[in-house]
Image (cartoon, rainbow, N blue to C red):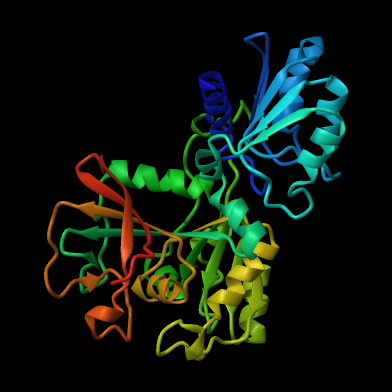
Amino acid sequence: MASDHALMARAIRLAERGRYTTEPNPRVGCVLVRAGEVVGEGWHQRAGGPHAERLALDQAGERARGADAYVTLEPCCHHGRTTPCTDALIAAGVARVVIAMIDPNPCVSGRGVAQLRAAGIGVDEGLLETRAAALNPGFIKRMREGRPFCRVKLAASLDGRTAMASGESRWITSDAARADVQRLRARSSAIVTGSGTLLADDPSLNVRLPAETLGLGPGEAVRQPLRVVVDSRLRTPPRARMLALAGEVLIACVRADPLRRAALEAAGAEVMALSPATAAAGQGQDAPGRVDLVALFAELARREVNEVLVEAGPTLAGAALQAGLVDELVLYLAPHLMGDFARGLLRLPGLAEMRQRIPLELTDLRHLGPDLRLTLRASRAER
């Protein structure tokens, strides 16, 4: 029915309010309706806090009995940080639950629906499923594939250059584009960069948006993503700017020199040694001796990282793309030219023929100030 679509769309808009605050949990919204009137609504705001269904039921009170519940994700049926939402819906006496998508978490998947139906509650599935799935690309991929959703951020001139030959790159894009990058950081669980970028730019890689912009209340601290440095030879200096900032820093290396490791750990970093990658892993011709990115991303998923933002130079960004780890590229194009000697966008060794090119699908295009932002995904279309 048209009203079902409108009410699920409302639940999706509610879920979007948790975009910057729910990690590592999914973003979920819920609307309760009885006799055509919205009697309760809520969205999951942060891990450990009440789920969307609980907040909506609390708001509705006795009016929840006989109501229809519109939920963007299958209600949980297991004990985690909170008690099962299926129990709460059953106890409240709702008549019907409309679910946008089944929870990919194997602890829940289909079991929540089964419990509701066993209690005599009508359940409809799949309403606005695509829109609901877009709320949680990282959570879904982590549950289904054991990897986080990877987004690569790139900024370039119209001729595809990311820095002058000297390394100078501030600033290629406008204030509006850089503010948009802050929002990408805020929604990410982790930000990944390389040792080359760290040594050249000494970046902060933190979220600098005001708390109220992210939907936080007075006195609430902005959640800082895990900052990950891919540093095969452990060249990160203990005085790196990011080590003095709020939030955790993980340095992934291949050879952990004991003295360097001790100095970095004393500065507050976590150092993790991984086996080196092999060229067969698809990370480029010179992969041996470098951090195995596939293993690193699996480790990040184990740590409940949903969305990764790669902010790195052409070598690491290209290696992630060739390793098949990149789900989305966000490219900011500035309306100027930087010339033949400036540095390129991505390092992709081994591409010598047109049939080897990497096809991309443009999913979004918009202006940000004077710049363009292109959002692209890997295309399955054959070339």
Give the percent coordinates (x, y) of residue 328.
42, 58
In percent of the image, x 46 and y 87: which residue is there?
A: 287
Q: Is residue 134 above or below residue 238?
A: above
> Which image quadrant is residue 49 in?
top right
Regarding residue 268, the answer to whether it shows in the image is no
5 displayed left or right of 379 = right
Residue at the (83%, 20%) spot, across then down = 93
| x, y percent for residue 245 | 56, 54
Residue at figure coordinates x 71%, y 41% from the top left: 47
Q: Is 80 located above or below residue 214 in the figure?
A: below
Relative image position of residue 275 (x, y in whole percent): 62, 86
Regarding residue 337, the answer to whether it shows in the image is yes
Is the C terminus in the top left, top right, bottom left or bottom right quadrant? bottom left
Numbered label tally: 0
Asked if residue 202 is positioned above or below residue 231 in the image, the reply reads above
Residue 207 in the image: state x and y as whole percent.
Answer: 50, 46
Looking at the rendering, in which quadrant would you find the N terminus? top right
Between 18 and 195, the one nearer to me in the picture: 18
Q: Residue 190 occupies which quadrant of the picture?
A: bottom right
